[in-house]
Amino acid sequence: MKRNVKNFGLLVMIFVIVAILSGGCRCITCPPSSQQQFEPQILEEIWYCTIEVPGMPKIPGMIDYMRDIAPCANYRWPAKEWYQLTSLTDTQKVLDNIGSTVGLISAFHSQPGCDGLPFGYVKYSNGVEDYVTAVVGSSGIEFYKVLGPSGNLVKMYPNCWIEEIVLY
């Protein structure tokens, strides 16, 4: 009987050692592996103002696209001199990784590769504000607003109810 108990104890000890050596400690004591951070692919870069060179076609700047989306706005402010643009898919992935709309502007720009991407807000005449971004879309540079706490991006169209547009 004592021999069976010793054999059972030895068998349990061998099982524990094998479990630890085969990676079983991950479940108990090891910290979870870090997830690979996503970094958006930069597709285009744009100056904030229009570039005009005699004899050459005019190159629109971010301010021109802001005028297009907010034609009646009293205040349009591109906060940077140079913007980088990515795709709608990459921008949505960045927002999905953040997972919250609290402090979204700073949270967005703190994500890897996002400090040069345009992200800001629009303010409507009724006082409502939406977070907005600009991306390279199928028809050139397009504006999208963040819809509610879900963080889904919805395409914007020219809107005279927009009083302010600011892109950081």
Image (spheres, rainbow, N blue to C red):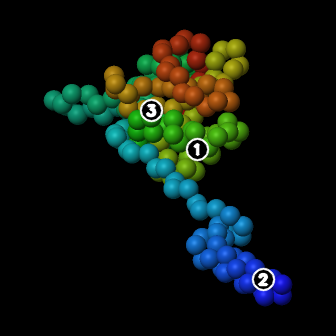
Q: Earlier in the sequence, mark 1 or mark 3?
A: 3
Left/right placement of residue 55 relative to residue 43 reads left
State the residue at coordinates (38%, 44%): 42
The quarter holding residue 141 reads top left
Check disc 2 and give the amino acid type.
Asn
Percent of width and height locating residue 148: 66, 26
Residue flagged by tag 1: what amino acid is it?
A: Asn
Give residue 22's position: percent from left, percent from top. Answer: 58, 72
Tell me, for residue 4, which label it has, or none. 2
Q: Say which of 111 and 83 sits in front.
A: 111
Mark 3 or mark 2: which comes first in sequence?
A: 2
Q: Name the residue under label 1.
A: 97
Please state the horizontal and vertical placement of residue 10, each as a whole percent of the image: 72, 84
> Which of the 4 image quadrants contains residue 67?
top left
Image depth: mark 3 or mark 2 in front: 2
The secondary structure type at the circle numbered 1 is helix
The residue positioned 41% from the left and 39% from the top of the image is: 86
